[in-house]
Image: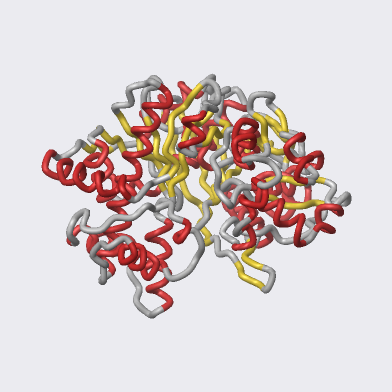
Amino acid sequence: MSQARSFLALDLGAESGRAVVGKLRGNVLDLEVVHRFPNIPVRVPDGLHWDVLRLFQEMKEGLRLASRENQLASLGLDTWGVDFALVDSAGALLANPHHYRDSRTDGKMEEVFAIVPREEIFRTTGIQFMQLNTLYQMYALKQSSPHLLDAAAKIVMIPDLFNYWFSGEAVCEFTEATTSQMFDPVRGRWATELADRLGLPLQKMAPVVQPGSRLGEILPFVTEECECPPVPVIAPACHDTGSAVAAVPAEGRDFVYISSGTWSLVGVEVDRPVITERSLQYNFTNEGGVAGTYRLLKNVMGLWLVQECRRTWERRGVSYDYTRLTEMAAEAPAFRSILDPDDPAFLHPGDMPARIQEFCRSTSQPVPEDPGSIVRTALDSLALKYRWVVDRLEELTGRSLPVIHVVGGGTQNRLLTQLTADASRRQVIAGPVEATAMGNILMQAIGLGEIGSVAEGRSIVRSSVDLANYEPRPDAAAMADEAYERFLKLGPR
């Protein structure tokens, strides 16, 4: 590389989105956030939806602002997984996509299992069972609105919808496609036989492309509106976790990553899916990764618990920022009460403080009363759940995993990061905060031939950010050991 190259990452999380310009100068990647915007779902009579039109408008504004000061080499975007959109033969959006936390999938897993056994679904897809998976969402849609599926010419995942609007190319990027629980990783194609038994039109899913693929140039209506040249649209790892893991600043393979945000994705990279009786028993997942890898991981509810507590208190007229909530949690007693973060009671939006209190009450534990104690209960429990997942990962892979890399926005919660080191008795390395945007940009650079490999990209990350190191504290680790025994009795899954 003879000179700096600028790339635009459009990174949409479940709570907010951002447009990030990355300048690649030799072995250093500098980031500038040029636009931030909230991602607020909308509830209407038929359920909870993503406001995809507003999100696309915000992304176009990010492109406009980025192009004003930079000569962009390409654009790439990433979002969450599992949600999908229906497009008709004229390219029009048929309905506003539902949000994965919508309650229409309540009970749908059990209905599906009555047709195709749980074990068979896992053998086919290797994906963990969550009612929010695309498989159960589409099954629910077939029951409630079959005319929409009949009218669809193509079905795309959410980032692929935005890629289509930017480039005119309707595809499904590999890392995103695998989150659906409708992709066969062994055969490397959509699991059409599974879908046929459920009456789902999987033949309408757009073709799958690999991360780093060039989709085409930005369409003329976008270039005119955003006053930008027709730069290439690259599909990075369009699933945000896939991009975040691409930017983990690790050397070698014997590490655990935690992509920490609204969700916590705890896993390892493997060369092939681990589809075994044990991985089924532990409800682990095999999501597509970059450069021919898979991500053996478990989705943990993550900082959603704290986010939803904060929203509940705001609705009652009491506003705390996350820094203050963490400070109050640090002052609360450690491991006094614990919960399983993945209990179904915590999935849907609502009064999260009351749900945490009820869980503690129903399990005969002290009930946290104040915000600090409630948040401390959530953070302690997350750290214990991380330990459970890491222990299972060592068992499933037969590998020693002495280091945990935490990336993403959750690294800013220093209390949770230290608790993770204490509970797991492992070294924890935190950073970068903007891992998803960095991984997105690095995959764009790989797609354009600017850098040669993911390993080279990770070296660039190590040269570009300051990493924080956390070691387990003996007294706190001993306290966590005692709490972990109580945690195991809750029956975590």
User: Which of the image's four quarters has the C terminus?
Assistant: top left
Task: State the residue in front, 453 or 317.
Answer: 317
Q: In the displayed structure, does residue 451 sit left or right of residue 83?
A: left
Single out the residue that lies furthest toward the left.
475
Give how far across and how far down residue 222 sits, in percent: 73, 51
The image shows residue 97, relative to residue 468, as above or below, that is below
The image shows residue 386, relative to residue 318, as above or below, that is above
Image point (76%, 58%), residue name: 143
Task: State the residue in front, 319 or 3.
Answer: 319
Give how far across and how far down residue 1 sits, in percent: 52, 22
**Residue 228 appearing in the image:** no
Give how far across and how far down residue 168 sits, in percent: 78, 43
Which quarter of the figure has residue 182? Answer: top right
Q: In the displayed structure, does residue 420 sit left or right of residue 267?
A: left
Image point (64%, 37%), residue name: 121
Task: State the residue in front, 89 or 434.
Answer: 89
Single out the residue that lies furthest toward the bottom.
317
Q: In the displayed structure, does residue 417 sit left or right of residue 120?
A: left
Give how far across and how far down residue 83 sits, in percent: 64, 50
Task: State the residue in front, 120 or 151.
Answer: 120
